[in-house]
Image (tube, grey):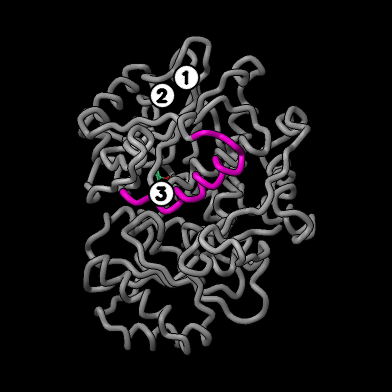
Amino acid sequence: MNLYNIKHPEQQVNFAQAVRQGLGKDQGLFFPATIPQLSNIDELLALSLVERSQKILAALIGDEIPADKLNAMVKNAFTFPAPVVKVADNIYALELFHGPTLAFKDFGGRFMAQALATVRGDGKITILTATSGDTGAAVAHAFYGLENIEVVILYPKGKISPLQEKLFCTLGGNIRTVAINADFDACQSLVKQAFDDEELRQAIGLNSANSINISRLLAQVCYYFEAAAQLNTEQRQNLVVSVPSGNFGNLTAGLIAKTLGLPIKRFIASTNANDTVPRYLQTGEWQPNATVATLSNAMDVSRPNNWPRVEELFKRNGWNLSELGSGALNDAQTETALKAQYAQGYLCEPHGAIAYQVLKDQLQEGETGLFLCTAHPAKFKESVERILGIELPLPDALDKHNKLPLLSDEMDNDFATLRAYLLK
Ligand SMILES: *Cc1c(COP(=O)(O)O)cnc(C)c1O
């Protein structure tokens, strides 16, 4: 597989290099040089999630990774289903939250971990990351048990929810978690100092397992096919997909699926009050505001870092950005949407509620709508319980961790201490 840096197209890498490096020169994003057109979509849709995904990823990645290895990577990563559930007439939910950390990031995170373990080369690898909650859990679970990869996750002590902490600080093994006596920014700054320390980097093989890693997006392509596979031929004719968007990785993956030949009529980018993209699509002006905190906090992003990939894909395919639907909801509208879904008999959470409502508002006669549910309602337990006036039981996956002891170390906000800890 050949990829190029969108900022510096002369920088070209293969899949292994793109996975290992994450970002290119000048923080440029890597993008596939070619995306094949698949001719056998109906045959693919008849396969199981794992078998179909093995074929899709083989078509994208090419022969750089031997088939038996790639097949094992997919099988190890995709260990949970992505069911389509009917919510209203012509409207379906694609539930992406049945993985170990109950969010769609498990798909990308787990495949990235498998990819990194495969293309790593020799030498030690240490994944170092800072988290304010969710990404840490996804990274910890994705890398848990992989040989010769150490994971160190920093988080602000007392500043993440106790349930979030339990989810990733109870694993042990190759996962070390460190509660820093400071805020999230300080944790991020410690990580940055570590990456700036060339000697340390070499000594422990530092890697960020960053969210913009191309392997994540390639994995996410597969669940769009899985959704189509669960709809009938007629529903697939005029399929409109609404994607709750923050950094726009999820939407990029959907657009890659369409480029591969998956019949999706159009996409809708749904956001919260951080609506840089919906405003841009309406006015043609890119004017990010200061980020505001919302109920759908995983989408509190005003400068979405995957947006250049979306534009690149439109440009390369000769599509016009005016074909991309969009809509934004504020918190009050999100609450109304969540209640409306619940009245329909579907329990959701704020991110999925936004995708649902924007879809419902824009769906036309004769179209079938699909919205992506990116997190389990229990991950946003407090808001969901308050808005709907109900009590949510903890799902087994969370409950199991909730009963285990915390294994975190504690550390002051001091780089020298962290350095010694990493080298130990
Ligand atoms: C990360 C996340 C999103 C946003 O996805 P992007 O790919 O960044 O657009 C939406 N919902 C949830 C629950 C998330 O964790």
Report the magenta residues as a range: 302-320
Q: Are marks 1 and 3 in contact (CB under 8 Å)?
A: no
Residue at the (38%, 35%) spot, across then down: 281
**Vertical relation: 308 (above or below) 407:** above
Q: Is residue 351 visible?
A: no
Mark 1 is surrounded, within 10 Å at the Cα level, by few (under 14), some (14 to 19) or many (20 or more) other residues, namely many
Disc 2/disc 1 C-alpha distance (Å):
9 Å
Numbered tag placed on residue 247 in the rendering: 3
Mark 2 is surrounded, within 10 Å at the Cα level, by few (under 14), some (14 to 19) or many (20 or more) other residues, namely many
Kindly state the secondary structure of the residue where label 2 is placed.
Answer: helix
Q: Is residue 124 visible?
A: yes
N-terminal label among 1 and 3:
1
In the image: residue 165, left or right of residue 311: left
Q: How many marks?
A: 3
Which kind of residue does numbered mark 2 sit on?
Leu
Numbered tag placed on residue 91 in the rendering: 1
Residue at the (40%, 41%) spot, across then down: 245
Kindly state the secondary structure of the residue where label 1 is placed.
Answer: strand
Q: Quadrant of ligand 1?
A: top left
- Looking at the rendering, in which quadrant would you find the N terminus? bottom right
- Give residue 63's quadrant in the image: bottom right
Q: Are marks 2 and 1 in contact (CB under 8 Å)?
A: yes
Residue at the (79%, 55%) spot, across then down: 67
User: Would you name the residue on which mark 2 appears?
Assistant: 359
N-terminal label among 3 and 2:
3
